């Protein structure tokens, strides 16, 4: 597996993988109207224009994972960590998060997920992220926000 920057030609494949990866999250929440399942190709292109997309590719050059981020002041906002469902729990997500952190050294990193995504929260905590805020979005959805400071130093 190789992690590299995604190119604009990769965006459709990344969006298709996003739909596939977030189905399990939708099932967990019993809500198939979550934003990652409704995001359009044009919205992904806009995110791409304003941030960084990384992709994980297998030996057949197929995209099996992706993560995106953008920087604002001293914070890097990490979003949409996705891994092909049958490739999950193999360290791909961990490597993608670490690769984003390497792209933006010496920063504060922020990421969020549903409070029902226990596996995802455990992954982020294993990587050194700490919960700092929860936000109720709807009756079905509470978001947990986690942060991490590079080298454990507040910037």
Image (cartoon, rainbow, N blue to C red):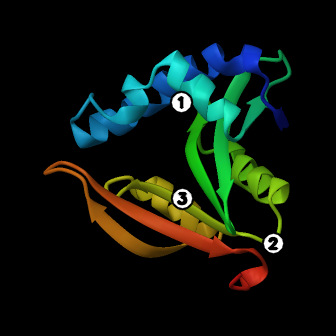
Q: Is residue 20 left or right of 55 when viewed as pictured?
A: left
Dividing the image into 4 quarters, which one contains the C terminus?
A: bottom right
Helix, strand or loop at label 1? It is helix
In the figure, 150 relative to 114: above or below?
below
Helix, strand or loop for disc 3: strand
Disc nearest the viewer among 2 and 3: 2
Q: Residue at x 83, y 53 (%)?
A: 103
Residue 18 disc label: none
Residue 26 placement (x, y as % from top left): 31, 34
Which element carries disc 2, helix, strand or loop? Answer: loop
Q: Residues within 10 Å of mark 2 (few under 14, many from 20)?
A: some
- What x and y, as percent, mark residue 109? 64, 65
Q: Which residue is mark 3?
A: 111
Residue at the far front: name it. Answer: 73
Disc 1 crowd rating (10 Å Cα; few below 14, some 14-19, many 20+) is some
- Tell me the tag on residue 106: 2
Q: Return the residue nearer the eye: 90 or 26.
A: 26
Q: Earlier in the sequence, mark 1 or mark 2?
A: 1
> Spatial distance from mark 3 to mark 1, Cα to Cα?
20 Å
In x, y percent, where is residue 18?
A: 52, 27
- State which mark lies toward you, 3 or 1: 3
- The disc placed on residue 85 is 1
57 to 81, vertically: above or below = above
């Amino acid at each position: 597996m190789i992690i590299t920057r995604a190119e604009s030609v990769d965006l459709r494949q990344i969006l298709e993988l996003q739909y596939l990866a977030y189905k399990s999250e939708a099932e967990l929440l019993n809500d198939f109207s979550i934003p990652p399942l409704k995001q359009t190709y044009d919205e992904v292109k806009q995110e791409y224009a304003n941030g960084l997309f990384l992709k994980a590719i297998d030996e057949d050059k197929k995209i099996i994972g992706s993560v995106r981020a953008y920087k604002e002041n001293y914070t890097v906002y990490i979003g949409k960590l996705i891994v092909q469902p049958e490739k999950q729990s193999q360290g791909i997500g961990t490597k993608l998060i670490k690769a984003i952190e390497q792209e933006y050294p010496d920063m504060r990193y922020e990421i969020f997920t549903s409070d029902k995504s226990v596996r995802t929260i455990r992954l982020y905590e294993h990587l050194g992220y700490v919960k700092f805020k929860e936000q109720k979005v709807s009756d079905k959805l509470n978001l947990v926000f986690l942060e991490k400071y590079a080298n454990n130093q507040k910037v």
